Image (cartoon, rainbow, N blue to C red):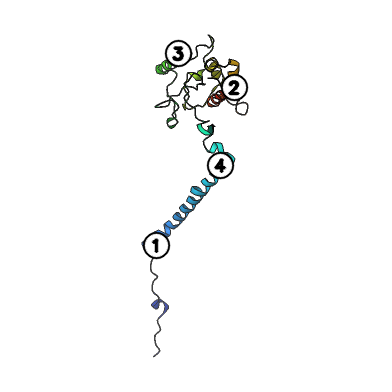
């Protein structure tokens, strides 16, 4: 009698089914690889490239638009400072807390034009402004930006009218002529953006540094 040879069906054994761990790993492997890839490209390579380009093309802006005096950084051209001495140009009021021009807490008072508190504050500022500038000719209009705070509380610029309003005080405090003070202010007027947007402004810090360079008390 011929020997019985087992068929293929009889000799083959079923392939082992993947374990839960292998199934899970196979499912999440693409997510892990994609996360690592995006981290390298968008978290490291892209920021490094943009930082490098900024340092090459716009080094001043990339480093905070710092202003230097006698080789030392004294301020940022983008953030105003709280000037109170009579020989310096004053900026607009600041409503930041806990003190004026606090860059860590930029913001306004959030008071509207119908607020009695705002009206009283502005009236107090007007009185203080007139007291600090007694030599301004009577009837001179008070520039709004000298008595009204901005939304950010950090404006580094004021209007040309606001700078001119302070000329008598600056000239008297420094022992300079008003014409000399105005000439310095005029040299630091920034015109409208693209010639049509906004209004001409004066950077308070730039003028004050220029006044110090010009001498006077």
Q: Is residue 191 above or below residue 48?
A: above
Q: Position of residue 58 (x, y in %)?
A: 57, 38
Q: Mark 2, mark 4: which one is toward the viewer?
A: 2
Q: Residues within 10 Å of mark 1 (few under 14, many from 20)?
A: few
Left or right: residue 109 compared with residue 197:
left
Question: Does the image show residue 126?
Answer: yes
N-terminal of the pair, mark 1 or mark 4, is 1
Q: Is residue 148 above or below residue 106?
A: above
Looking at the image, is mark 1 or mark 4 nearer the viewer?
Answer: 4
| Residue tagged 2 | 184
Q: Secondary structure at mark 1?
A: helix
* Circle 4 residue: 55
Secondary structure at badge 4 equals helix
**Number of numbered labels in the structure image:** 4
Pick whichever of labels 2 and 3 is earlier in the sequence.
3
Q: CA distance from mark 2 to mark 4?
A: 32 Å
According to the image, label 3 marks what residue? 127
Q: Secondary structure at mark 3?
A: helix
Q: Residue furthest top?
A: 138
On-image quarter of the N terminus: bottom left
Q: Earlier in the sequence, mark 2 or mark 1?
A: 1
């Amino acid at each position: 009698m011929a020997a019985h040879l087992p068929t293929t069906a009889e000799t083959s054994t079923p392939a082992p089914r993947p374990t839960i761990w292998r199934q899970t790993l196979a499912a999440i492997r693409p997510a892990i690889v994609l996360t690592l890839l995006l981290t390298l490209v968008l978290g490291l390579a892209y920021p490094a490239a943009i930082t490098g380009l900024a340092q090459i093309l716009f080094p001043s802006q990339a480093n905070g638009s710092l202003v230097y005096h006698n080789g030392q950084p004294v301020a940022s051209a983008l953030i105003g400072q709280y000037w109170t001495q009579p020989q310096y140009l004053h900026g607009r009021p600041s409503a930041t807390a806990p003190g004026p021009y606090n860059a860590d807490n930029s913001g306004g008072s959030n008071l509207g034009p119908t607020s009695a508190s705002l009206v009283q504050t502005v009236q107090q500022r007007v009185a203080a402004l007139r007291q600090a500038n007694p030599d301004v000719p009577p009837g001179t209009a008070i520039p709004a930006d000298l008595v009204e705070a901005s939304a950010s509380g950090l404006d580094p610029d004021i209007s040309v009218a606001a700078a001119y309003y302070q000329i008598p005080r600056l000239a008297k405090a420094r022992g300079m002529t008003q014409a000399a003070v105005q000439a310095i202010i005029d040299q630091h007027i920034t015109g409208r953006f693209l010639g049509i947007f906004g209004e001409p402004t004066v950077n308070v810090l730039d003028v004050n540094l220029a006044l110090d360079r010009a001498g006077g008390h």
